[in-house]
Image (cartoon, rainbow, N blue to C red):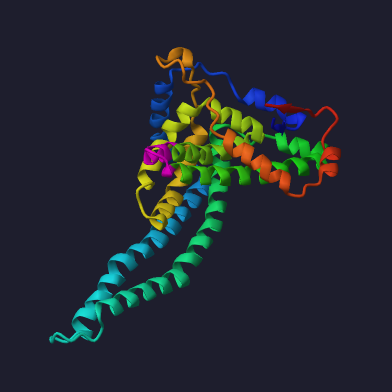
């Protein structure tokens, strides 16, 4: 039995108001709708045309990840490595059968230069890009929400103004739990690749995780709690499967560094599209496969593992209870 804290009472009404009831569709129609919506780059164009801040953030993100990061990787792989081979073949090796460097030595030299390149450039660039990307994404997400949904929700601000201790407790617990849960979900996605038909299962899970990343910025700006986000995500599982599919296919089959850089470059575009999109829930009653549930418990294993991990960590239970208002309640599943 898992116990979960519901959102602060001041946010509950807003979450119910934001999650408008939309007519359900058959799962395959929801998947197709998600794929269709993911190509709505006209939304990106409209936002970038009228919002200078988001335009500069997207431009910086493309330059950082596309030009600088991918460009440096391509320069090393297709420029420096062939040039090194050219030097070893024509400058160091004589025309006789005796070579200055044996093939084994050439391989070791190439690996050494590759490691030196990674340590001095790739790894620092990778972590720097992570930090800068986070700033760019947040700016784009805020501008997208304001453009397509109106001003960011005052929900969390209302809590902070009326109950500062409750707001701090809510934000900290939500942030820590979200990070741990999403980390566990990523590990699960990697592990399913080892199962039979693991490639296809892994692609499906990656579609869901990618969609979760894209839409979560908007949900946070809307003031939704973790519980509300998870429920909404699991009820729209078919739509999110379709939405994440093009993005995953574009990056899945590349090497780790190329895939990460391309993902980081394309991500702000999909954040904009996700903020403007309206997910469609599925219903088993409209499907020929009646065994398909309306809500697919995608996050249940990761939440159970996360709850177990969180129980092992020290937490200020007393202060948390004091920070929560009297009419806050708990639900169990």
Q: Residue at x 38, y 65 (%)?
A: 72
**Viewer-proximal residue among 54 and 131:** 131
The tally of labels here is 0
Residue 80 rendering spot, x and y as whole percentages: 31, 72
User: What residue span does the magenta drawing correspond to?
Assistant: 193-204
Residue 185 rendering spot, x and y as whole percentages: 54, 42
Quarter of the figure with the N terminus: top right
**200 inside magenta stretch:** yes
| Left or right position of 160 against 208 | right
Q: Which residue is drawn at 49% across and 28% down?
A: 237
Quarter of the figure with the C terminus: top right
Determine whether 236 is above or below 83 in the image: above
Residue 60 rendering spot, x and y as whole percentages: 47, 55
Q: Can residue 47 be seen in this view?
A: no
Quarter residue 149 falls in: top right
Outermost residue toward the front in this view: 196
SS assignment for the magenta stretch, majority? helix
Outermost residue toward the top in this view: 285
**184 inside magenta stretch:** no
**Viewer-proximal residue among 26 and 163:** 26
Quarter residue 307 falls in: top right
Q: Can residue 15 be seen in this view?
A: yes
Determine whether 222 is above or below 84 in the image: above
**Viewer-proximal residue among 178 and 143:** 178
| Left or right position of 20 against 197 | right
Determine whether 88 is above or below 42 in the image: below
């Amino acid at each position: 039995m898992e116990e979960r804290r519901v959102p602060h009472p001041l946010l509950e009404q807003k979450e119910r108001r934001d999650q408008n009831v939309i007519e359900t569709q058959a799962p395959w129609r929801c998947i197709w709708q998600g794929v269709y919506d993911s190509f709505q780059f006209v939304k990106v164009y409209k936002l970038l045309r009228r919002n200078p801040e988001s335009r500069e953030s997207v431009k910086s993100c493309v330059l950082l990840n596309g030009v600088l990061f991918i460009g440096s990787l391509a320069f090393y792989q297709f420029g420096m490595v062939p040039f090194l081979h050219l030097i070893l073949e024509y400058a160091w090796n004589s025309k006789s059968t005796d070579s200055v460097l044996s093939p084994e030595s050439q391989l070791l030299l190439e690996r050494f230069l590759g490691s030196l390149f990674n340590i001095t450039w790739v790894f620092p660039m990778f972590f720097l890009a992570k930090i800068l990307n986070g700033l760019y994404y947040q700016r784009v997400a805020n501008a997208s929400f304001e453009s397509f949904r109106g001003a960011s929700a005052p929900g969390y601000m209302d809590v902070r103004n009326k109950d500062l201790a409750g707001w701090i407790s809510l934000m900290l617990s939500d942030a820590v739990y979200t990070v741990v849960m999403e980390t566990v979900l990523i590990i699960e996605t990697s592990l399913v690749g080892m199962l039979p038909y693991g490639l296809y299962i892994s692609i499906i899970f990656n579609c869901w995780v990618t969609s979760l990343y894209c839409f979560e910025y908007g949900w946070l700006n809307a003031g939704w709690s973790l519980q509300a986000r998870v429920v909404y995500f699991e009820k729209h599982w078919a739509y999110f499967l379709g939405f994440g599919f093009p993005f995953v296919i574009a990056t899945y089959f590349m090497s780790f560094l190329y895939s990460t850089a391309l993902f980081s470059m394309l991500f702000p575009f999909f954040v904009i599209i996700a903020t403007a999109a309206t997910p469609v829930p599925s219903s088993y009653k409209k499907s020929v496969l009646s065994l398909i549930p309306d809500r697919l418990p995608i996050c249940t294993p990761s939440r159970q593992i996360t709850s177990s991990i969180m129980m092992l960590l020290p937490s200020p239970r007393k202060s948390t209870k004091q920070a929560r208002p009297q009419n806050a309640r708990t639900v169990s599943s």
